[in-house]
Image (cartoon, grey):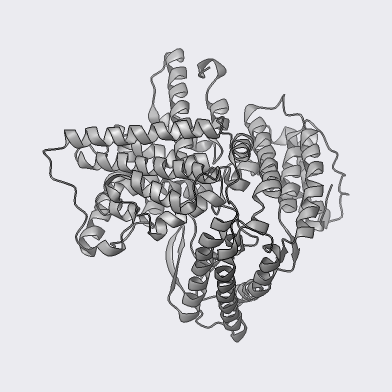
Amino acid sequence: MCTTESDFEKSKILSCVESGEWRKAYPRKTYAAALSAASILCVVLLSAGSIQAAPVVDAPNDYQTLIRLFEEWRAFERPSMKGYLPDYSADAMAEKVKALPEWQRRLAGIDPESWPIEQQSDYKLVQAEMNGFSFNLRVLRPWARDPAFYVSIWPNRTDVPSREAPVSYPEIQLYSYRFPLSAESQSDLTAKIKLIPAFLTEARENLKESNARDLWIYGAQELRNQASALKSLEEGTLTVRTLEGRQHADLTGASEELRTAVSNAYQATVAFIAWLEQMGPSKTGPSGVGKENYTWYQQNVHFIPLDWDGEVLLLRRELERAHAALRLEEQSNRKLPPLEPAPNAAAFDNLAHERLDKFVNFLVKQQIISDKPYIRGALAQQLGHFVPEDKRVFFTRISLREPMLLLSHDYHWIDLARMRDEPNPSPIRRTASLSNIWDGRAEGFATAFEELLMHAGLYDDNPRAKELVWIMLANRAARGLASLYVQSNQFTLEQAEHFQGEWTPRGWANANDELTAFEQLLYLRQPGYGTSYITGKVQFDRLLTEYAHEQDLEGKPFVLRDCLDRFNSEGMIPIKLMEAEMVPARAREP
């Protein structure tokens, strides 16, 4: 069914692709390539009046039916709009609740059993997105419970495929604009920003029944960040971060209308923060989703085959392993001098660039991954900077001692560059999955990569740096374990902060700093994100084991680069789905 004029045009193009002649003409082309060529041909023929658009006939076992459904589904999942103003009212979301079963019925009417395994995985991704939206409508309900949901301004590109945690639509991505703004960009940005006051007025109505104390108390900080960004933009002091690097953002040459819109948005945000602070103390209810809901969400949306208790057991084990390994590494290094942080900005800048060269050379020369033209550039644009002692948080304490630890986790930026330069042939994998379904692949692999490179020899000439690998892992396990107790409503966020601080070695995660509070709020707002660093890592370990076992069965040598090249080509999908695509059933663990 075509719901808009745009959808109708797409259906005409797709009908060209699905004709028998197109299948003969493109026997080895991807669907994406065929669609591109077909689009051109259809436009030419239609404009010449040579053909009539053929009706699209649903074929329940046809992959292209899934693609059409996916595109229509993504349009449905977005809120109803009044211009740039989204409608998250109780009535509007009740309409989504009524309509969702029909979307699920349509998906269930497609039988992918005979499809190639990659297409079956795409089907499961769409199914998981619908499950995620169902969970949002039934349980999470961020538009009705979570004040941070009403942040609209985003000055920085996140380092993962899409914004972490539920976000309102549309995101006002300041980093996507080029400054100084063109007339067209000014018009677009003005239209979006000028509606922030109305959106925050709507938020007060939508949130009036919310009693989730921690979401209110901690969520106000996210709105303070929005106010700060708007004020900096107005004053000409804002820096935004993109995949290509950082740029200065200001209102040079901007119209009076845009300047007024920014000022009004700032004032509305400040007033909304004051309202949150006024109402916050009266909120007394829990904010976590509970064990049963958490388990359902992880199993049916994020492809994690564990329940809440199983994740607790896993994260405890990783916390214990990291602490034990750290103590043994310290014992081994006891006669070496301690690894001190860079003493000043010049020293750190020199260290960071030296380590960047060493890191990229190691990846390529040691055959970790294949060389790509975008690897060094993706990492070089994200190098950190020197931070004075009194302003340091966990990650700056690490990077000032050895930048390659964060470069390892910054595989995120390589992933994003790959998505930009080598888009996946699957339309479903080409864009980020909803509900942060990619979290285990993004965060879990980045965490696994830290330990993988240590074992591959990256720090053989600097043994003290190995201690930092275990400290990083202990921190991820501690904060993930705390997030599980928050979701089960056994911890408040304040208790989670103290747990994370206590169980991070050397006291490097302060329970009272902004980073720890930000992390725990994020993991509360997005169930499973805090544990994904460990659950995804363990899934990658399993995948690596099974892939190597298959090579053994075939009588072939295990080549890490071949394994990771195949892994990268799968796209940003759950590792559980990759397992079915990369490893034959005979080589998988029972």
From the top left corner, tell me how far across and down residue 167 is, in percent: 60, 57
From the top left corner, tell me how far across and down residue 480 is, in percent: 45, 42
Say whether residue 523 is visible.
Answer: yes
- Place residue 366 in its image quadrant: top left
Residue at the image point whose x is 47% and y is 27% from the top: 543
Name the foreground residue: 492 vs 337: 492
Number of numbered discs overlaid on the protein picture: 0
Look at the picture and state if 161 lies above or below 467.
below
- Place residue 586 in its image quadrant: top right
Residue at the image point whose x is 51% and y is 44% from the top: 490
- Place residue 389 in its image quadrant: bottom left
Furthest-bottom residue in view?
256
Look at the picture and state if 442 lies above or below 331.
below
Name the foreground residue: 450 vs 206: 206
Name the foreground residue: 263 vs 3: 263
From the top left corner, tell me how far across and down residue 141 is, in percent: 67, 52
Look at the picture and state if 477 lies above or below 420.
above
Say whether residue 161 is visible.
Answer: no
From the top left corner, tell me how far across and down residue 183 is, in percent: 60, 78
